[in-house]
Amino acid sequence: MTGYLADVAALARKDLRLELRARDTLPAMLLFVLSTLVVFHFALPTGADEVAAQGLLWVALVFTALLGLARAWAPEREGGALEGLVLAPSDRSAIWLGKSAAVFLFLVAIEVVALPAFSVFFSPLDGSAVLGVLLANIGICTVGTLLAAMAAASRTRELILPLLFLPLAIPLVVGGVGAGVSSEPARYLTFLGLYDAVFAILCWASFEYVVAE
Amino acid sequence: MAAAGLVGLAIVLAFLVAPEDADQGISQRIFYFHVPIALTAYACFGWGAWKALRLLWTREERYDLESYVGVHMGTIFGALTLATGSIWAKASWGKWWVWDSNQLVLFLVLFLFYSAYFMLRFSIDEGPRRANVSAVYALFGVALIPVSFFAIRLAEDFIHPTTFTRDGPQMTGTMFLAFCVSWLAMSVLAYALYRVELLGKRLDANLRELREALT
């Protein structure tokens, strides 16, 4: 077990170090999410209520996550490293978990800027909305990382990822928006937790088949 | 043949034998097709996922094609569900699309999901990799069905629901009979189409193999 966790940590650390050195994904995601928020200001006519803005926050978050996910396996693909990782004598699901952890940290880093920016531009967010974002992050990174690996195996790559991801992200958006706007957010947070658990287990069990021949 | 006969019988039962709905009139009769088609679509998706699981479990190649054909049938019946549901919505509520019908919204989500399945499948070169990736995606589908169902239920609370409900009077005996026959007919039809497509695809594969062996 400790060996497994050490593998996961090493793989996640590798991604973070790559990002710190090359800095090609995070700044792009950050600029993207801020630009979308500005676009939303003009997309919302005067008189649109704050609840509508809450919904748009989720559009921004999901599309920003897609931007990051499209690049998630790029270093492995360009360097041909995935074959090496698959052949390494460790559990293959560790590759997925390590990548998911890295993507999760990227998302959190983006949201540290995006959520305050949203509060300033539109309306303040309460604690349950932030908790909803965090829980949805888990779902986004677990499912998204696996789908990105699938997309990387196909010829169309970045083109196909949104098509695979968006139908699966709809429940996350429902849970996230509900946690933000509903008067009883606990149901939505429970739902998000349930989604995370179901899909994390499914991804964990099936990742091996996606990368192995 | 059996499928065609059953579908004919279902049509006769639905239009001639079952009593007219007092509230909705003739348009209610599409219920005898809409709901059985929807149930059949679920069954096909489930079948496709079951075969996908068998493929990952046993690594036998033939399950790949069976899973694909199952999902294909599910998508066809899913599209039919959307079409019949839309016609029903137009007839009884005057609009082609209503977001209030949870079933229809769920089918729209599933339709998008499974359309992406075909995009994914056809953008990977044939081989074990394609089989595995398609199988994993098909398995995600059966997990998505209940999750989306709950999600759409939950979303009703903040996407204002309107007041009409679908719960009319209970089905009478003949109505229930017509419904069951139609359901059976759709299932047999789906199974027949499944066999035909599978046979065609296998023949095609065999022919290609033969041609490659000859050249």
Image (spheres, rainbow, N blue to C red):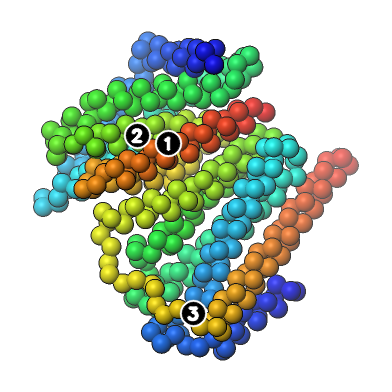
Of the numbered discs 1 and 2, the one sitting upstream in the chain is 2
**Callout 1: few (<14), some (14-19), or many (20+) C-alpha neighbours within 10 Å?**
many
- Residue where numbered disc 1 is placed: A196
Q: Quadrant of residue B3?
A: bottom right
Q: Which of these two is toward me, B144 or B82?
A: B144
Asked if residue A38 lies left or right of residue A195, the reply is left
- Residue where numbered disc 3 is placed: B171
Question: Relative to residue A191, is residue B171 depicted above or below?
Answer: below
Name which residue type carries label 3.
Met
Residue B108, percent from left and from top: 44, 57
Q: Quadrant of residue B57?
A: top right
Tag shown at residue B10: none
Asked if residue A128 lies left or right of residue B40, the reply is left
Asked if the residue under mark 2 is in contact with the one under mark 1, i.e. CB atoms within 8 Å, the reply is yes
Residue B155, percent from left and from top: 32, 53
Q: Which residue is found at the position 53% from the left and 36% from the top?
A: A202
